Amino acid sequence: MAKEPRENEVKFCVFDLMKIASCLRELKARLFLPRTFEVNLRFDVPTGDLKRTGRVLRLRRDKLARLTYKDNSQNIQGALTRREIEFVVDDFESARQFIEALGYQVAFLYEKYRTTYEYKRTHIMLDELPYGNFVEIEGELEMLRPIANELHLDWDKAIPASYHALFERLQQTHGLHFRDLTFANFNGRKVSAQDLSIECADSSTPWSKS
C-alpha cells in the first residue's frame, strides 16, 4: 500500500527575507525554484463546508498549474501536519471550470511571490505576500526544528495559521471589505506584524510593509 501523502510544515514571519536567502546560500542549499509569481484560488461550496471543517481545495498557478486537497491540520509542537493530495493539471482555466462544474466556487484568491530552496531533504520557501514576508519549511517533522535553528528562526514564534487566516485577522482589525489578498488591494497600505497578531521570528526590530 502506498504511503499516505502528508504535508508537514512550519511557518514564520520574518523581518529580513534577504538575510534568510543569504543564510541558505551559506548553507549550500540548492535553489529549487527561482522567485515566481503565484495565483492561488481556494474553493468551497456556498455553505462553506470545507472552511468549517478545516479542509482546503486549492488551484495554484505558478510555472505550472496544480490542484491540491488538504485535510484539517494537526499542531504537533508548533508544526502543522495533515494529509495532502496534489497533482499537476494541464490547463489552469479548464481545471477551474471543472471544479466549478462540481458545485464549488472561488471563495478566496491570494497572490504571492515564492522562492524555493532544497536543503537536507526539506523545502524552504521564501514567501512575499501583500501583507508581509514569511518562511515556510516543509519536510519530515523531525527535520523542521533543526532547520529552523540553522536559519536562526525562533521556533516559539512559529505561526499555526494559514495565510487566509492571517488575512481574516486583518479584515477584522482593519475593517477591510475586499475579499482577495492581492498586491493591488494592498497598494499603499501599511501592515505590521502586530496587525497580524504575530511576531517576526528573525528579529525583534519592528517591521512594517508599505
Image: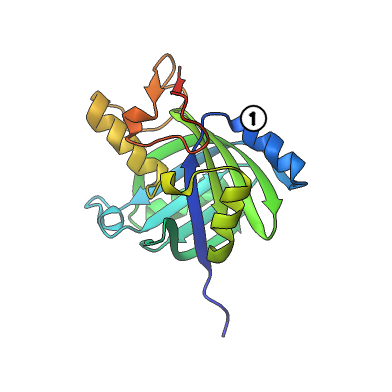
Which of the two residues, 29 or 2, is positioned nearer the viewer here? 29
Quarter of the rendering occupied by the C terminus = top left
Which of the two residues, 20 or 210, is positioned nearer the viewer here? 20
The residue drawn where x is 50% and y is 55% is: 9
Residue count near mark 1 (Cα–Cα under 10 Å), binned few <14, some 14–19, many ≥20 = few
Residue 174: where, in percent of width, then height?
26, 24
From this viewpoint, is residue 174 visible?
Answer: yes
Labels in figure, total: 1
Residue with the most extreme top position:
188
> Could you say whether the residue bearing mark 1 is in a helix, strand or loop?
helix
Dividing the picture into quadrants, the one containing residue 125 is top right
Judge from the rendering whether residue 49 lies leftward or rightward of residue 116; answer left or right. Answer: left
Residue 99: where, in percent of width, then height?
42, 54
The residue drawn where x is 40% and y is 35% is: 199
- Residue at mark 1: 18
Judge from the rendering whether residue 132 lies leftward or rightward of residue 179; answer left or right. Answer: right
Tag 1: residue type?
Met
Judge from the rendering whether residue 116 lies leftward or rightward of residue 183; answer left or right. Answer: right
Above or below 19: residue 96: below
From this viewpoint, is residue 63 visible?
Answer: no
Above or below 112: residue 9: below
Which of the two residues, 56 or 155, is positioned nearer the viewer here? 155
Residue 171: where, in percent of width, then height?
27, 31
The residue drawn where x is 37% and y is 37% is: 198
Residue 17: where, in percent of width, then height?
59, 32
Judge from the rendering whether residue 129 lies leftward or rightward of residue 87; answer left or right. Answer: left
